[in-house]
Amino acid sequence: MNAVAAVRASHRERGEIDGLVQRGLERVEATDPGGALTDRLSVLIDAAVAADPTQTGLAQRVYAEVLALGSVNS
């Protein structure tokens, strides 16, 4: 859910995006790769699915949003 909230905050260009991503990474015990938001979100999504494979469907939808986010910011 932190990845979803970070994508939504990014689309609105407000909110504590870095904090959302960092808390999500901590929650799933993943290391923050740093760098671009899209890279950080990809690591978060992968780690979330590894922790709970039943979230694969949601992860695919969030990945689509992350890809769209990356193309908007390019």
Image: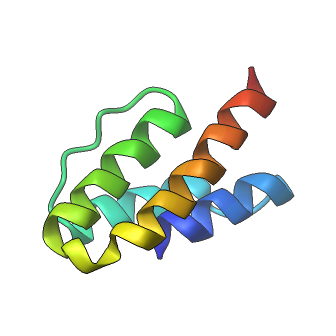
What x and y, as percent, mark residue 13?
Answer: 82, 52
Residue at horizontal 59%, vertical 46%?
66
What x and y, as percent, mark residue 3?
Answer: 49, 63
Residue at horizontal 24%, vertical 72%?
27
Residue at horizontal 15%, vertical 70%?
51
Seen in the picture, residue 27 relative to 39 is either above or below; the reply is: below
Residue at horizontal 41%, vertical 41%?
40
Side of 13 relative to 63 (left or right)? right
Q: Nearer the viewer, residue 32 or 45?
A: 45
Res 54 → quadrant = bottom left
Res 24 → quadrant = bottom left
What x and y, as percent, mark residue 69?
Answer: 70, 41
- How many marks overall? 0
**Which residue is farthest top?**
74
Seen in the picture, residue 74 relative to 47 is either above or below; the reply is: above
Side of 5 relative to 8 (left or right)? left
What x and y, as percent, mark residue 61?
Answer: 56, 62
For the C terminus, the image quarter is top right
